[in-house]
Image: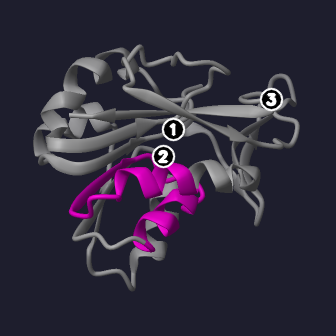
């Protein structure tokens, strides 16, 4: 079953689903990621302007993005339940535009941005294409970053970062990241 068809459970500390076949719990996002999300948000917002966030999750990075001095904040979210949570979150934020769909399917409706954060889970059917398309989503001198599941200066999107910040973390046990250091990729266009 595809991720977008999974029934998610939302708690104060996490988003997860239980695989009906294996009864295994798959965490989508957890609150231990807060320092990482803040660092991603602060980096892409450091020049202000128009920000694109691909993947909403628990809204942690979205809150940090909104705490910065930005002009607009576009969020692309593919999971219907998470999209509904994002809609509720954005009700009092006039500079936010939320788009339901896969980033790849809506890419021609997106503009160029000053900052971009790519953090999707479980629905990366077009993840390989992102490294070739990202440059078209960025304004000159735009700043981009993305979730890095690797515990090194490398990443699953195969995008060459300009640099990495190493952030100490203490993740709760999960199936997606269990290291004591997070390598945050940074790229300027």
The disc, 1 or 3, on the residue closer to the chain's N-terminal end is 1
Residue 13 drawn at (x, y percent): 77, 60
Q: Nearer the viewer, residue 82 or 96?
A: 96
The residue sitting at 62% across, 18% down in the picture is: 152
The image quarter in which residue 92 lies: bottom left
Q: Distance between the residues labelled 2 and 1?
A: 5 Å
Q: Distance between the residues labelled 1 and 3?
A: 24 Å
The image quarter in which residue 87 lies: bottom left
The disc, 2 or 1, on the residue closer to the chain's N-terminal end is 1
Mark 1 touches mark 3? (CB < 8 Å): no
Magenta run includes residue 79: no
Q: Mark 1 points at which residue?
A: 4
Q: Is mark 3 on a helix, strand or loop?
A: loop
Residue 32 drawn at (x, y percent): 76, 51
The residue sitting at 88% across, 36% down in the picture is: 173
Name the side, left or right, on which 146 lies relative to 176: left
User: Which image quadrant: the N terminus?
Assistant: top right
Q: Is mark 1 on a helix, strand or loop?
A: helix
Above or below for 179 versus 87:
above
Residue range corresponding to the magenta coloring: 38-67
Q: How far apart are marks 2 and 3 (CA)?
A: 24 Å
Magenta run includes residue 61: yes
User: Which image quadrant: the C terminus?
Assistant: top left
Q: Name the residue under label 3.
A: 178
């Amino acid at each position: 079953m595809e991720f977008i068809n999974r029934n998610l459970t939302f708690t104060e500390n996490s988003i997860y689903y239980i695989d009906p076949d294996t009864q295994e719990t798959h965490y989508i996002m957890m609150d231990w990621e807060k320092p990482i999300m803040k660092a991603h948000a602060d980096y892409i917002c450091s020049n202000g302007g128009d920000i694109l966030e691909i993947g909403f999750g628990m809204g942690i990075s979205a809150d940090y993005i909104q705490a910065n001095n930005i002009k607009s904040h576009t969020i692309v979210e593919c999971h219907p339940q998470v999209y509904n949570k994002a809609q509720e979150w954005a009700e009092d934020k006039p500079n936010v535009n939320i788009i339901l769909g896969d980033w790849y399917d809506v890419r021609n409706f997106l503009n160029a941005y000053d900052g971009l954060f790519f953090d999707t889970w479980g629905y990366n059917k077009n993840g390989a294409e992102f490294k070739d398309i990202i440059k078209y989503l960025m304004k000159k001198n735009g700043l981009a970053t993305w979730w890095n599941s690797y515990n090194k200066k490398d990443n699953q999107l195969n995008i060459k970062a300009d640099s990495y910040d190493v952030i100490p973390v203490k993740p709760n046990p999960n199936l997606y990241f269990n290291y004591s250091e997070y390598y945050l990729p940074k790229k300027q266009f």
